[in-house]
Image (cartoon, grey):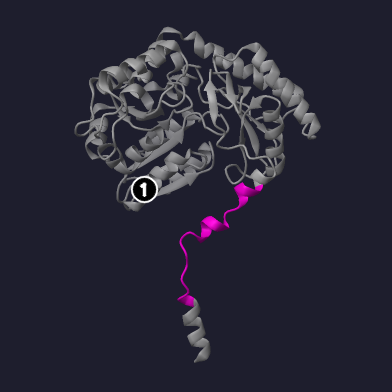
Amino acid sequence: MEQIQDNINQSNVAVDLFQKCRDFTRADEVKAAGFYPYFRPIEENEGPVVQIEGRKIIMAGSNNYLGLTAHPKVKEAAIKAVEKYGTGCSGSRYLTGTLDLHNELETRLAKFMGNEACLLFSTGYQTAQGIIPTLVQRGEYVVTDKDNHACIVAGYMMAKGLFADFVRYKHNDMADLERVISRLPLDVGKLIVTDGVFSTSGDIVKLPDLVPIAKKYNARILVDDAHAIGVIGKGGRGTASHFNLEGEVDMTMGTFSKTFASLGGFVVGTERVINYIKHHSPALIFSASPTPASVAAALATLNILEQEPERITNLIRNANKMRKGFKELGFNIIDGQSAVVPVIIGDDLLAFKFWRELYDNGVFVNVFISPGVPPGLQMMRTSYMATHENHHLDRILEIFQQTGKKLGII
């Protein structure tokens, strides 16, 4: 009896919700070692060169792919929007938060992407949450690449909470996609969701192989082109355009926080589907609408993208130069065709040390460690802009070479 009472007493011990917060010390340990790379405040942002902690540093980790965040026309558009509309909309799109600017950008983006309709969201992350659980409901399936962005993961987990289900297939493995989807009932709704350009590795989805599988198994396709629009495709129109499959993708979502030099997200598709999302998506209906400055900045960026397609040429030329340069130096990279060039380091601590050496020598990149990437793929995720000049790129390669030799990577 005493043992039973002891067990009862132990099971009734109060657990503090915040105990896990006190137990989390990994970040503190990295800070104490002097290698902490995150939350570094940027004091001035001029594109390829920024100021951090009073020093000018070459930025090789930004998603500002076309280099437009500091463009005079983009800044002017944002300022004029604030002067005309104020700083916010103070309501959701569904009620009092729709401006003529929102409608204008939706019309322009739908036309640019070759679709019937477009719907704006307040962030790119929120866009997936606004689409996936709205469309995929009880008894239906999300079929998703294992390496999809976290916003897609959040979206299908929300769908699961509504009694939909999800299955995952191996990264960019179309044989595994067919293996997985072939096991699902043919007579239920299915949505295949994939990044266009995968944000960590920079590789591109094998869309020409994915499309026939979707048709064979009666599935719809949603492509997240956050890292593709303004980077690949005709005039920067993204993954479907890159493969000449514009009419074969049902929906494309994107973000304004990268090539569009702003903040927000969007989805394009057929008018009936966009209309349904507009009237059923809690993420849209219960969120404040994108701010006037954000929308105006995105509109100005779209103008520049259409008028100056050479920016895309410059961007890809810069990224290709770095791919070639890293390989010639002896680094192991994940090859691709986008603006993202990952340099594999292969160890958490070594990756932090590598980052610190780069930073101390005037180069900023993003360090990805496990569990964000699989063990052995810890990396310096470098990314490039159309506005990087050769002297910036040469300096990055020089510092990488010095660091690689110092730490025994090359």
Q: Position of residue 318 (x, y in %)?
A: 60, 16
Question: At x 36% / y 48%, what residue is drawn?
Answer: 158
Closest to the observer: 333 or 396?
Answer: 396
Amino acid carrying label 1: it is Met
Closest to the observer: 42 or 392?
Answer: 42
Q: Is residue 116 visible in the rendered structure shown here?
A: no
The boundaries of the magenta stretch are: 11-29
Closest to the observer: 41 or 96?
Answer: 41
Eyeballing the image, is 286 above or below 88? Answer: below
Question: At x 52% / y 55%, what residue is drawn?
Answer: 21
Question: At x 23% / y 31%, what residue is drawn?
Answer: 275
**Quadrant of residue 284 within the rendered picture:** top left
Eyeballing the image, is 367 above or below 61? Answer: below
**Quadrant of residue 142 within the rendered picture:** top left
Q: Which residue is mark 1?
A: 158
- In the displayed structure image, the side of residue 158 where residue 86 appears, left or right: left
- Any magenta on residue 194? no
**Quadrant of residue 282 within the rendered picture:** top left
- In the displayed structure image, the side of residue 357 where residue 38 appears, left or right: left
- In the displayed structure image, the side of residue 299 where residue 98 appears, left or right: left
